[in-house]
Structure formats: structure tokens, C-alpha cells
Amino acid sequence: MTATKRVRVHDRQGWRQWLGGFFSSSIGLKWLMALTGIGLLLYVLAHLIGNLKIFAGVDPETGAYPIDLYSEALTTLGGHIVPEGSILLLFRIGLTSMFILHIWSAAVLTRRNRAARGRGRYDATREYITATYASRTMRFSGIIVLLFLIFHLADLTLGNANPDYVYGAVHDNIIASLSRPVVAVFYMAANVALALHIYHGAWSLFQSLGTVNVKYNVLRRYFAGAFAAVILIGNLSIPLAVLAGWVS
Amino acid sequence: MDFSLKVWRQDSPDAPGGFKTYQAKNISPEASFLEMLDDVNEHLNTIGEEPIAFDDDCREGICGMCGVMVNGHPHGPQDGTATCQLHMRKFSDGDSITIEPWRAAGMPVVRDLIVDRSPLDRIIEAGGYISVNTGAAPDANVIAIPKEAAEASMDAASCIGCAACIAACPNSAANLFTAAKIGHLSLLPQGQPERWTRVIAMVETMEEYFGSCTNHGECESACPKNISIDFIAMMNRDYVKAQFKNFAKIGQ
């Protein structure tokens, strides 16, 4: 019998004896993924609630679009107390860090899992019993969402991907962008991927964080399903409404 | 009953393995899966071919020695059953059956269907013990234990260490095995003194060999003892709590 090769060894000397040791373990990385996941879930929900203002149309008295005012309010968060845009900047830094940590932990874990799997592939077709389509495609749904995010920022935040982009004219920018059928289809496909990602993630995070309670465990699945459904229906309603001409 | 078997044959850990097809003829529907393999091996003996090597011991589902991948299912298609307790009546006459060893980098094939499960022993060694006083045996039930805790601990303790959870996991993670071994001790008063050092030591030994949990839940379905992944959540919680527990070092 040959000695089994150890895949990796934890070094708990130096800085790793602090929380670095925790975050180099896979359980620690899953904690990081779950915590950043919660942050990103809250962001996605807040983003959806803000975006639904597009259905508020135009204010007949002032001629202003409520969604434009919402975007303006984001830049002036904190009122006269802090410099304009500073709270939004903090939000953006936090959000970007969460994305980076979420993706970094996923990348590290994927690499470790591939190493642990080795070259061993089963010949017989695996019939997964409990693993869902969503759980097995997290990597792919995550990458689709990331690619969409890059386009989405270029399209509606920076304006590079939208020839009709006007800074601050959120309502007009959305209509101009989603009136292009290719963009609308990409938008909807990415949101299906996002919903799948959330369907597994919003359940899985409880397991990773160890919030296990026999009485409430059953609610985790409903919570994840409901969260994914709200995000999916809410986000799909916007491109569908634009394509159907309900908002213009 | 007749079956066509597609079996993984591998002479040594470093030898390249491959599938070979064998015919199992006149197998009783009452035969267990391992008895069917015994039958095939008897035949291989008579024709002078090397028998198929597989692990087994008690053949009553409590030792954890047996275990092969049957048609892509760890321990075969029957829920909550070890390979030795799977009977051929669960298959149909004429079925072709693919039999493979557990696959994980940390658990290499020794020969044919036998894998090296010694990393599981390393995990146990790291913390799967408790401290007790020597001397006269204490009276039974001196330590009060809530019934629920005793039951939950027993559920975890039903782990037979067969490694089906690792075989079922797309990441080759041993989290269910390790969580069961940790949970079984940590739920009881006797397991408290080492609770926090245990979880760190066992988790980090586990990670030297195996992958990480992505919460698919396949391990729970594969487990011949139906151990719940709730124990994995419990281990995750204890592992983070343990990071903040170092009372023994106060004042040092």
C-alpha cells in the first residue's frame, strides 16, 4: 500500500495563527462566500426596488422621472453632511470588495476541489439525487452574471456600450438600452442565471454559516426559492415592459 | 438471474486501470451484491484469472469495509444500504452493471475496487477521542444527558466510515464523515473538554486530503446510514466558534 499523498498542509505559523488561518481553510472561505453572498443579495434586492421606479413613469407636474430623482438621490446621500457622492463611493468600494472576495473564494475552492477530485472520473453516468441543476452550475451561472455585470456597467453606469447614453438620464438610458432586442435578451438570460445562482446560494449560505435549526431548516428552501423568484420576476419585468412598449 | 458486469480492474496503485466485462450467470435473486461478486470470482478462479479484489468484512452493513460505485450510485441504487446489504433482486435479469471503485485523489485505488481509506484514520487520530478518568468504572447514567442530544449523537455515531460520502461528492469532500465524527462527540458532555481543539484539528486534517463542501447534499443521499448534512452545518459553526476560543492560554 502506498502512502497517501497529502494535498496541502495548513501552516498556522506567523499571520496565519490569526483569522488568516481561518480564511485559508475551506470552511472559512465558505464563510467568506456566504457573508459576501448575503451582502450581494441585499444589494440585488435594493437594486431591484430602485429600478422598479421606472414603472412610476413621469411626474406630470415637474416633467421629471422618479427614477432619475432616485439616481440623483444616490449621489447626494448624506445630504450636506458629507461631500457629495462620498457615501455612494463607499457603497461602490464595499460592493466591489464583496464581489472580489466572493469570486476569489470561489476560485480558490474550485482549484482545491479539482485537485481533490484528481483524475478520477466515474464511467457510469452519475444520477444526482439531491444536487440540483442550480447547485451544479454555480460556476457557470456566476460567470454569466459576471460577464453581464461588466456589460451592464459599461451600458448604464459608464455609458460606453450605449450610444444614446446621457449622464443622469436614467429613464431614457434604460429605454434606449433595452429597446435593442439583443441587449434585452442578454439581460433576461443573465437574470435567469442570477436567479439560479440565488436559488442555490440563498439556501447554501445557511449551511455554510452553520445556522442549522431542525425546526426552521425547512424554511431555508422556501426562502431561497422566494428570493430567486422575486429577483427573477422583478428584473425580467423591466426588459419585457420596454420591449412591449408599456414604458417609454 | 444473469448480469453483464463492467468492472474496473487495476493491478496496483500506479498501474493504469481499465474496465473488463464479465458475465455473472445463474445468480440467485436472494444473493447480496458481494455474494454475486464471490460467484464471479469462483468462476475466475476456475479459469485461472485473477479474482476481482474488493473490500468487505461483516456483510451486515455495520463495519464500513465494503463499498463500490454501482451504476454511478455509491453502494448501489437502494437508499440507506451498504453494498453488502444490497440484493440482486433489486436489479432486473439481464442488466448490465458498471462497478467502479470510490474515486478521490486523497483515496487512491489500491487494487481493482479497493481504495486506500487511511486518510479517514488520520482525521480520527487528529481529534476523535475524549478524556476520561481511569480507575473504577463510574455508575451508569451519572452524567445527565438530554434524550435529544443522545439521539442526535447516536445518529452521527452511526457513521461506519465507508467513504461513500466522499465518493458521492463532486468535490471529493469528506465533510459529512468528519462532521459526523465531530458531532457524535461534541453533542455529549463527555466530548466538551476537547470540543474546540477537536474541530480545528479534524477539519484541518480533513482538508489535507479532501475537497470542500458546496452543499449539494449528495453525501447525505449516498450515506448508507442516512446521516444528515445538518451535522456539516454544526461543524461549520463550531469551526468558526473555535477560532475565538483559547481560554486555556489566558494570561500567557
Image: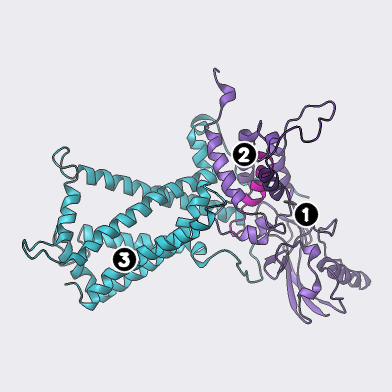
Q: CA distance from mark 3 to mark 1?
A: 50 Å
Q: How far apart are labels 2 and 3 at the CA level?
A: 42 Å
Comparing B6 with B202, the one in front is: B202
The residue that disc 2 covers is B199
In the rendered image, which residue does mark 1 sit on?
B64
Query: Looking at the image, which is closer to me, A157 or B32?
Result: B32
Q: Position of residue B150 (x, y in %)?
A: 70, 44
Chain B drawn colour: purple
Q: Main secondary structure of the magenta part?
A: helix
Nearer the observer, disc 3 or disc 1?
A: 3
Which quarter shows the N terminus of chain B?
Answer: bottom right
In the visual, does B9 lie left or right of A114? Answer: right
Q: Amino acid at mark 2?
A: Val
Q: Where is mark 3, residue-wise?
A: A235
Q: Quadrant of residue B30?
A: bottom right
User: Chain A appears in which tint?
Assistant: cyan
Q: Quadrant of residue B246?
A: top right
Local secondary structure at mark 1: loop
Q: Chain of mark 3?
A: A
Residue at 21% over, 69% down: A177
Q: Outermost residue toward the bottom?
A: B94
Q: Quadrant of the C terminus of chain B?
A: top right
Residue B69 in the image, given as x and y percentages of width and height? 71, 65
Task: Identify the residue at horizontal 23%, vertical 46% (top origin).
Answer: A88
Same chain for mark 2 and mark 1? The answer is yes
Any part of residue B105 in sight: yes
Q: Which residues make up the magenta segment?
A: B169-186
